[in-house]
Amino acid sequence: MPDADALHRFLFAQVPIRGEVVRLNQTWCTVQANRNYPPPLRRAMGELMAAAALLTATLKMQGSMILQLQGHGPVSLLVVECGTQLTMRATAKWAGELPEGGLKELVGDGRFAITLEPRGGRQTYQGIVPLEGGSVADILQNYMMHSEQLETRLWLYANEKTAAGLLLQKLPGRPEQDDDAWNRLCRLAETVQATELSQLDVVTLLRRLFHEEDVRLFEPQPVSFHCGCSRDSVARLLRLLGPTEVHDMLREQGAIEVSCEFCNRRYCFEAEDTEQALRDAVGTYDIPTRH
């Protein structure tokens, strides 16, 4: 598969507009292998992963971006986290049989949040807006326009093997010499086909879409799956719960088992392990499931 698990940045030389193309293969397959996601959920999840990689690559900070959809439909939560080194993980929560249809049928009414977590203990930023739009691309475009004042267009695609995306974005603070450039380039990008986005090598794809434009393509950046959960992070969670609740759980269950929602890795704490965790826990915690 050409350009698998890679993000490509490009610029239009004559106008202040940048672009990116991403394709996730093994990264996307690893997320699906960790949990048995129903088919109606896979498209939205794959599209959100592609979008997260595209948007994270526009950041200047070092850290991570978390995209989160919360709704009142059968899918109550959809989360993708992407680090600025393009290491990714994702998870979702749902109940019952999922209906066929679009994002609206899956998530219903709710909210969308983007969280930026810089490294080094700097302040976390979070923007929250209502879910507006019938697709992942619509929701993100509305958010970027209204919350970040950045004109951004996204074209996203996902099936069981590949998640892919194309982004165009106006460069902030740069005057336009060509008043029609943004509309022209968006019209050209609108012609992209799902098979082109998911299968063509990037050079051929850009040549097909923008063959009359002066496009400068940069070296690709690899994308990969990574989950930062650890035994230390679970120990930190136990300490946050406090001795009373932890001891109650031990009396009821004999041991405490925690599963990472992202990678499905399981951690078991016997009584002796738990007492040590309560004394010495370090690190940060992930989204847990108790058994």
Image (cartoon, rainbow, N blue to C red):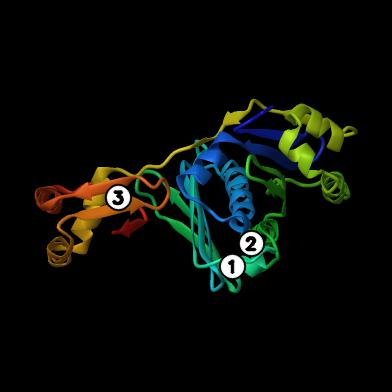
Binning the other alpha carbons within 10 Å of mark 1 as few (below 14), some (14 to 19) or many (20 upward) gives many
Residue placed most toward the observer, 167 or 258: 258
Residue 239, numbered label: none
Residue occupying image coordinates x 56% and y 41%: 28
Where residue 244 appears, as percent x and y from the top left, is 13, 67
Mark 3 / mark 2, whichever is N-terminal: 2
Question: Disc 3 residue type?
Answer: Thr
Q: Residues under labels 3 and 2: Cα distance?
A: 29 Å
Mark number for residue 284? 3
Which residue has dot 2 on it? Answer: 143
State left or right for residue 14 relative to residue 163. right
Q: Amino acid at mark 2?
A: Tyr
Nearest to N terminus: mark 3 or mark 1: 1
At mark 3, the secondary structure is: loop
Say which residue label 1 marks: 107
Quadrant of the frame with the N terminus: top right
Say if residue 130 shows up in the picture.
Answer: no
| Secondary structure at numbered mark 1 | helix
| Residue visible at 25% across and 44% down in the picture | 231
Q: Amino acid at mark 1?
A: Val
Say few, some or many: other residues with alpha carbon within 10 Å of mark 3 (under 14 / 14 to 19 / 20 or more): some
The answer for how far apart the CA atoms under marks 3 and 1 are is 29 Å
Residue 259, given in percent of the width and then of the height, sits at 33, 52
